[in-house]
Image (cartoon, coloured by chain):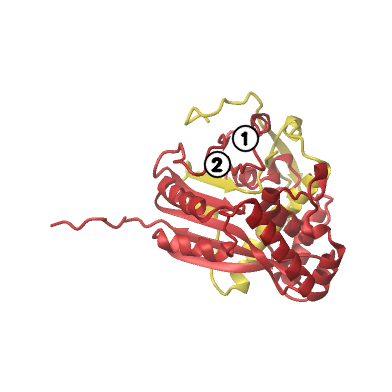
Chain colours: A red, B yellow
């Protein structure tokens, strides 16, 4: 079995998902909206260098709590990837806006990481709990509920149809694919390793998982691996990492897609 | 950008490069055209370590998307895959929390 990896990983432009889509689907036009939270504001200078593909557009970041300056029923597909920890009201608004810009029958795809991990040991559980307390102290409005549940519930509440969802576990620690006792990586890891080795890279799923976690949940509370005098990441704790590797602890990644209804339900009854 | 007037057009254009592939069974030579971006795209202030992470990230996302089909016992697919079968000129909006921010 071969993974349908269509990406040319050796091209410089493929490091972001939006650029990957623009390269893979040259007929489609891809608009990229960076999710700029107060802790991670996007800068214009960064954005200026990103629009190098004719079918790729980087939109300037705008407030997530207001109406997006995008036309209604405009996009065929909307893809929300790894939303950071947000208040429930903002997340609700985000899904509502994504539905608005989707044309009837358009698809939404979600990929999100849960704050809690699967198969946590006591040290990891304590570290995550302390992190939740820190998040709550920084911003009490931020939702600490599992993103996978919240997003699926929001999609259903917003009237999306044909929803399909699954959870994929990505290891939290451990360097080699052989060390993963169970899960999809044992089946697919060799293929991914081969793809990456062709471009001279080593396959490091745990590093990527921890990077996703840091992007989603640690940036907002000033934890950035100890850079610039900030607090260290929970993944800098060697005890936690050893425990995760020993127990096979993993990040829970929700992969989900749904479809905007072709016929919108009327809000009023015709008489 | 071009459509919305939100962003200026860039003057840098991608380059099409021809790549020679392995010959077919009957010995005929094969070529494909690959889109290559100018080196300017590298000037984004990303460290080499982060570049490596992002390449891994891309592979892992693709792998997870594909593997979820088998492990969940459900048919999962990317909307973008649906679009491959539809007409050109479709539009995709990507909202990415792991995209570049500084």
- Sequence-wise first label, 2 or 1: 2
Outermost residue to the front: A137
In screen coordinates, is B84 left or right of A247? left
- Could you tell me which quadrant the C terminus of chain A lies in? bottom left
In screen coordinates, is A242 left or right of A88? right
Residue A140 in the image, given as x and y percentages of width and height = 59, 54
Query: In which quarter of the view is residue B15 placed?
Result: top right
Question: What secondary structure is found at the residue carrying circle 2?
Answer: strand
Task: Output the chain of dot 2.
Answer: A
- Seen from the viewer's position, the closer of residues A157 and B81 is A157
Q: Is B45 drawn above or below residue A106 in the view shown?
A: above
Q: Are marks 2 and 1 on the same chain?
A: yes
Asked whether the residues under the numbered discs 2 and 1 touch, taking CB atoms below 8 Å apart as contact, a structural biologist would say: yes
- Seen from the viewer's position, the closer of residues A133 and A262 is A133
In screen coordinates, is B87 left or right of B43? left
Question: What secondary structure is found at the residue carrying circle 1?
Answer: loop
Residue A221 in the image, given as x and y percentages of width and height = 69, 50
Outermost residue to the top: B11
**Residue count near mark 1 (Cα–Cα under 10 Å), binned few <14, some 14–19, many ≥20:** many
**Residue count near mark 2 (Cα–Cα under 10 Å), binned few <14, some 14–19, many ≥20:** many
Q: Is residue B85 visible?
A: no
The numbered mark at residue A53 is: 1
Query: In which quarter of the view is residue A111 placed?
Result: bottom right
Q: Which residue is mark 2?
A: A30
């Amino acid at each position: 079995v071969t993974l349908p990896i269509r990406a040319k990983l050796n091209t410089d432009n493929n490091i972001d998902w939006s650029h990957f889509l623009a390269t893979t689907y040259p007929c489609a036009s891809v608009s990229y909206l960076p999710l700029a939270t107060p802790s991670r504001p996007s800068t214009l200078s960064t954005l200026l260098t990103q629009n190098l593909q004719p079918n790729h557009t980087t939109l300037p970041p705008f407030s997530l709590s207001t109406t997006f300056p995008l036309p209604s029923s405009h996009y065929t597909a909307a893809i929300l990837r790894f939303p950071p920890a947000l208040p429930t009201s903002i997340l609700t608004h985000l899904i509502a806006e994504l539905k608005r810009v989707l044309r009837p029958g358009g698809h939404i795809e979600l990929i999100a990481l849960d704050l809690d991990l699967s198969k946590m040991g006591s040290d990891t559980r304590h570290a995550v709990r302390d992190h939740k307390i820190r998040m709550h102290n920084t911003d009490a409005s931020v939702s600490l509920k599992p993103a996978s549940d919240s997003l699926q519930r929001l999609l259903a509440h917003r009237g999306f149809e044909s929803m399909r969802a699954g959870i994929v576990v990505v290891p939290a620690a451990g360097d080699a694919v052989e060390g993963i006792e169970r899960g999809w990586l044992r089946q697919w890891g060799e293929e991914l390793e081969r793809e990456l080795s062709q471009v001279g890279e080593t396959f490091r799923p745990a590093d990527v998982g921890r990077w996703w976690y840091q992007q989603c949940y640690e940036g907002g509370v000033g934890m950035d691996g100890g850079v610039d005098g900030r607090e260290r990441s929970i993944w800098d704790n060697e005890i936690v990492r050893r425990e995760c590797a020993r127990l096979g602890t993993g990040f829970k990644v929700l992969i989900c897609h749904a479809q905007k209804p072709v016929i919108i339900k009327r809000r009023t009854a015709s008489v | 950008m071009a459509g919305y007037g939100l962003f200026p057009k860039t003057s840098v254009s991608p380059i099409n490069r021809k790549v020679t592939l392995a010959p077919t069974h009957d010995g005929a030579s094969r070529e494909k055209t690959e889109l290559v971006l100018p080196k300017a795209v590298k000037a984004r202030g990303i460290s080499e370590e982060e570049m490596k992470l992002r390449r891994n990230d891309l592979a892992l996302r693709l792998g997870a998307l594909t593997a979820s089909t088998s492990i969940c016992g459900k048919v999962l697919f990317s909307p973008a895959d649906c679009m491959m079968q539809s007409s050109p000129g479709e539009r995709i909006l990507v909202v990415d929390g792991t995209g570049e921010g500084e």
